[in-house]
C-alpha cells in the first residue's frame, strides 16, 4: 500500500491549558498489568457480508475547511462515518472532536504523528498510540473508539502487542481503498469505490484532499442506489 501522506472553538483556552501540560514525558512505559494484556486479535478489514451496511472511515488530518465540508455532505445524507484522527491534528484543532461527535460519528486513534508503524520498535509504537489516546481523553473524556495503524494496510505482531496493551482488541484496516489521497480525479475516486464496495465493506478515505469533497455526495448516492447504508464502525461491527 502507498504510504498515506502525513498531514498536518472546542475552547482555545482549554486547548492551550492542556497542551502546555501534555508532552512526550506524559507517556510512560507500560506497567506489569498493561504488559500482561493480550495482543490485539486479527485485523478487521470488513464487517458481516450479510448486512447491507458499509463504513466510511476517514483519516483525520489536513484542512479543517475540507473536513467540515465533508462532514456537511455526510450530514445531508444522514450517514454515519468514523474518523481516525492523527493526534497532532486534533491537538491543533480540538474543536473538530466536538463537531465529529455531535454529528453522531465515531472518533478513533490513528497514531500521534502518522509514522510508518511497521518500521518502529514496540516502545515507539506504544508511544504513538498512547499519545494520541491521551489527547482524545483530554478533549473528549474517552480514548479512541477504534485504532487504525498508520503507514501500513496490515498490522504486525509489534503493532498488535502495542494495540492490545492500549486496550484495543483489534486493529481496523479496510477492504476498499478509495485512493483519494493520491489526488486523483473525483471520478476516479468514485469509480474505485463503486467497483470494490460490497456489503460489510470498510472504505478508507481522507479529510485532507479537495477532490474528496466532490466525491463524497456521489459515493453516498451510489451506496444508496445499491441499498447499502453508511454507518459508523460501532454500528457495522456490532454483534
Image (cartoon, helix red, strand yellow):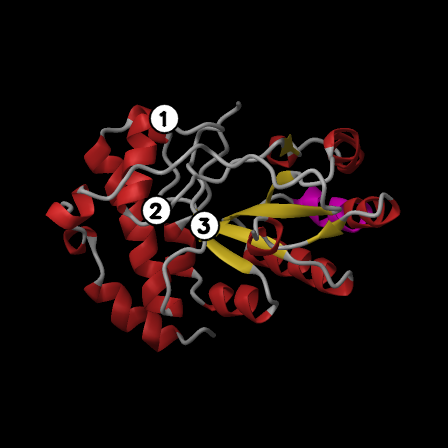
Rendered residue at 65%/36% (across/down): 180
Within-10-Å neighbours for mark 2: few <14, some 14–19, many 20+: many
Please determine whether, in this image, residue 196 is positioned above or below residue 169: above
The residues colored magenta run 210-218
Rendered residue at 67%/41% (across/down): 200
Numbered-mark total = 3
| Relative depth, front residue between 170 and 84 | 170
Rendered residue at 49%/40% (across/down): 172
Q: Which residue is mark 1?
A: 156
Q: Position of residue 123 (x, y in %)?
A: 19, 36
Label 3: state its secondary structure.
loop
- Can residue 1 be seen from the camera position used here? yes
Q: Which numbered disc flags the more N-terminal residue, 2 or 1?
A: 2
Verify CB contact (< 8 Å) between mark 2 and mark 1: no
How far separated are the C-alphas under marks 1 and 3?
A: 17 Å
Please determine whether, in this image, residue 101 is positioned above or below residue 41: below
Q: Quadrant of residue 188?
A: top right
Label 1: state its secondary structure.
loop
Q: Image check: 179 left or right of 27?
A: right
- Can residue 31 be seen from the camera position used here? no
Q: Position of residue 68 (x, y in %)?
A: 62, 61
Q: Which residue is mark 3?
A: 146
How far separated are the C-alphas under marks 2 and 1?
A: 18 Å
Q: Which residue is mark 2?
A: 112
Q: Which numbered disc flags the more N-terminal residue, 1 or 3?
A: 3
How far separated are the C-alphas under marks 2 and 3?
A: 14 Å
Amino acid at each position: 500500500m502507498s504510504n498515506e501522506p502525513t498531514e498536518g472553538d472546542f475552547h482555545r483556552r482549554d486547548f492551550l491549558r492542556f497542551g502546555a501540560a501534555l508532552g512526550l514525558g506524559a507517556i510512560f512505559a507500560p506497567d506489569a498489568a498493561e504488559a500482561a494484556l493480550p495482543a490485539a486479535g486479527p485485523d478487521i478489514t470488513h464487517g458481516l457480508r450479510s448486512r447491507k451496511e458499509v463504513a466510511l472511515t476517514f483519516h483525520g488530518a489536513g484542512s479543517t475547511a475540507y473536513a467540515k465540508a465533508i462532514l456537511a455532505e455526510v450530514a445531508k445524507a444522514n450517514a454515519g462515518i468514523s474518523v481516525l484522527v492523527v493526534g497532532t491534528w486534533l491537538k491543533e484543532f480540538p474543536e473538530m472532536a466536538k463537531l465529529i461527535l455531535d454529528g453522531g460519528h465515531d472518533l478513533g486513534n490513528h497514531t500521534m504523528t502518522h509514522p510508518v508503524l511497521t518500521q518502529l520498535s514496540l516502545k515507539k509504537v506504544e508511544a504513538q498510540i498512547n499519545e494520541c489516546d491521551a489527547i482524545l481523553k483530554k478533549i473528549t473524556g474517552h480514548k479512541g473508539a477504534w485504532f487504525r495503524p498508520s503507514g501500513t494496510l496490515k498490522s504486525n505482531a509489534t503493532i498488535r502487542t502495542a494495540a492490545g496493551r492500549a486496550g484495543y482488541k483489534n486493529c481496523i484496516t479496510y477492504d476498499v481503498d478509495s485512493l483519494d489521497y493520491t489526488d486523483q480525479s473525483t471520478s476516479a475516486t468514485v469509480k474505485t469505490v463503486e467497483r470494490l464496495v460490497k456489503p460489510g465493506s470498510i472504505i478508507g478515505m481522507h479529510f485532507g484532499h479537495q477532490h474528496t469533497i466532490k466525491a463524497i455526495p456521489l459515493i453516498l448516492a451510489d451506496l444508496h442506489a445499491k441499498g447499502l447504508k453508511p454507518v459508523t464502525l460501532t454500528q457495522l461491527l456490532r454483534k
